[in-house]
Amino acid sequence: MKIILFIAVLAFIFLSFSTAIEATQPLFSLYDPGTQFPVNYENFGTFSGIGTSAYSYTITNNTGLSAAVGEGIYPNTSSVYQDPEYQRYLAEGRLNGSHWDFVNSPDPQADFYKWATAPEPEGVRMFFMAQALVNAGLIDHAIKAYYCIIVSFPYTPSWDPGGFYWYVGPAAVNMVNYLCREYPEVGLRLANARVIIQNGEDLDLLNDIVTTTPGNYMPYTLQDRIAGIVDLSQLSIAQTRGTGKVQLIKYLNGHWQLKVDSRPFIIRGITYSPTKVGWTSNEMNLWQVVDDDNNGKIDTAYDSWIDTNGNNIKDLNELSVGDFQLLKEMGCNAIRLYHSAGADNKTYVPGDYNKPLLREMHDKYGVKVIMGDFFGAYCVGSGATWAGGTDYTNLQQRENMKSVVRAMVLDHKDEPYVLFWLLGNENNLEVTNTNAKTYPREWAEFLNEVADMIHQLDPNHPVAVGNFMLRHLEYYAQYAPALDMVGSNSYPGRYGFGISLYSEVKEKFDRPVFFTEYGADAYHYNVGVNEQEQAEYHEGCWKDVVYNSAGNPGTGVVIGGVIFEWLDEWWKAPGDSNFNHQTQPQFWMGTAPDGWSHEEWYGICGQGNGNNSPFLREVRQAYYSYKKMWAPPVTRDPANGNIILSWGTFPGLTYDVYYSNDSVNWALAQSGLPASGISQASWTDDGTYTGVHPNNLRIRYYRVFINGTVPPRKILEVNSGGSGSGRVLIQGRTNHSDTITFEMRNPGTTTVIKTYTITTAADGTYSLTDMPRGTYDLTAKGANTLRAKAANILVDTAKNTAIATLSLRGGDANNDNSVGTGDMVILRGAWLSSQGQPRWDARADFNADRSIGTSDMLIMQSNWLRSGVQ
């Protein structure tokens, strides 16, 4: 488990991650916040051995340092006990229990007090205390706590209940970098800080070597953030890996970029294994052929449907849409697949793949395939027994695996859906039953041998290794230079993967990295299903990926990632029925929202109660998060009198037909009377019938036959004449007068019934007339704002409708309903200009003060990577 400017979405993205965390008031106040921020440790002690394993910091002024850092931060371990709030919490029994129960609890203040006084090593104690401070919005104090770890306790390990350990030092470096980046009000960045762990892959602390460089704080202004954005088209290319249609480009600044057909391509991938309830891992590819409803279409690809009301029943309005369409709408461009190796575990099985299906997935839905080979993991391909395990020193097993890979490559290399080849899946973990960890050189040499073979067979597609984390990078650098990129299964938490990981890749093995797996489960052990925590985890990880992709202010080594996973799989909990959705955690995972891994809940879609598997989809918040982050803005023309007829479920019944973008499978009967006043037409491929009425929806009744059913029924009623009034407030402005486009829409859809373009008053008020009677959504958008929506407005011709106040977020300079790179380019071009000057561009004057500067930047920053209502 586990912009060419057209793609500026990637080339210039990210001032900061202010869409993830917006500035808020802290949840509580500190009794002793300290006297310095940041703390200048040179004033209170001496450093020695910087950059070596002999690093240390010796305090020479304990009293002064205690006063500077404030409560809870070493060496100030006493002032928290004097905190009146701490004393109140203690007296009320709100701190009772184990400190491990106070990690990410609903009360960050209690978490802070508990960890400030916890009986743990100082580095561990401060790490979890700092986490509570972040959750409480006390960012400066959190940064001080994390930095104290780097300075004084970089070598401290933290053991988890599973018997594994991790070092708080590198994690603290990650967090300081993250917080400085995420919270621009801090105005600082931590430069050159590193805590490097050697030999940390085993459980022997004694052989670990920790080298520390505490780094130093530098000013980090808005202008600095802008300067970090690089136009790659102006840089020379230092290296190209591959000669075919898929290449890896390294620029002179060290940034790596994946290109497909010479166009930049960031991997927006997902592990797609929609196993039906009751199946096991052995059926991982069966979805490609199963047609349980016998309609001639692959079930999961074309017949899945969204259970919008969560009742585990396919209601009349819950139409089949299919996973491929959902993936396309989400913005996914790749899935990761693996194959089996036959009954003898050493024979490639072509039948694992439905090539016509994969071709259609690529051609129609734009989704490519990362073609994976287990390469001996779980003994797949090696021919080894489970008792013996895959042995990378065994020549026969090596030949078996090489033969299987050769067959896979020859079978698929000319297919349009192939993105690249992926060898292995966590083979450097003993749990996959290989000896790669014991024989890392032999493992790396074999990888190189097979990668060379693939390059000879197929020069069009690169080769990657599927690693757990970044283990064995030094061996790949020395013994596997044929590898083009490194895949890492990594589950880092909601703050992203961290500067320590990216720095390690750059230093040890100069290749691009992508994340072959990342994600979080949607279950919290003492809360139940928690979609929000899962979504926040995914949002943090993806934003970290983009920040560290080519042309952006980060390291530039990341080329994308693969979500784990699309759909909950019910077979994963050991010792449990495959027909039971297990809610008990399987193992400790400290980075998970609740600290535990619930293996059967990693999908960004669920399967409900399982009775409608594999068709039902409970689409979770994470899906919609990715839809905002991945899917490009969609522009649709207003209906202008078009009547969209699309509804239907069971043959033999006649249904009311409403405005909708949903699909329907029934054909319009040619034998019955056509819809009154509507030209006869046939249904489109996606089941939508469009009829144009000449009187622009002023006729009250229409009739239509669906599937030849009789008698005809009234399907549409439109009556104009209602009115409504409301107010629009535009972010950052005192005068809210602007030209606003209002759209009346069918509820819950993007189908436009009527459009108004109105100039609002200075206080933002407006009125609409001639509104059709009924229930609608009303959207509003200015030329440089994001679209907002008031839902379910009931229009009655007998009275004026009061419409809820709409708040419009700014920053959309290019008027595409999203805030991103294109808007930043416009803002940069007009920076510090005023109306009448040559560089003035009104599109960037978000606060309408006729000058473009910091206040406009802050508006953009507060909505960075946000999209408006579609």
Image (cartoon, helix red, strand yellow):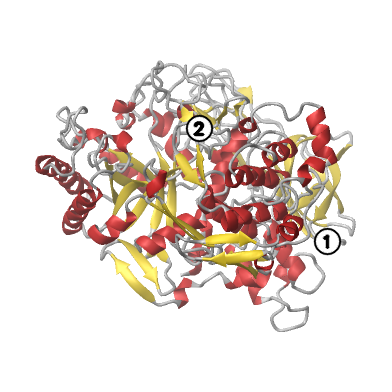
Three-letter amino acid code of the residue under disc 2: Cys
Residue drawn at x 67%, y 33% as measured from the top left: 105
Residue 536 screen position, x and y as percent: 60, 42
Alpha carbon separation for disc pair 1 and 2: 40 Å
Residue at the spot of label 1:
733
Residue at position x 59%, y 53% in the image = 149
User: Which residue lies at the image location 37% right of the left edge and 50% below the top edge?
Assistant: 199
Residue 531 vs residue 585: left or right? right
Up-down relation of residue 239 to residue 772 (above or below): below
Q: Residue 29's x, y, as percent? A: 81, 47
Toward the viewer: 747 or 94? 94
- Which residue in the structure is indicated by mark 2? 605
In the rendered view, tell whether residue 579 sits above or below residue 402: above
Along the line of sight, which residue is nearer the eye, 629 or 403? 403
**Quadrant of the rendered structure where residue 621 is?**
top right
Does the CB distance between marks 1 and 2 fall below 8 Å?
A: no
Q: Secondary structure at mark 2?
A: strand
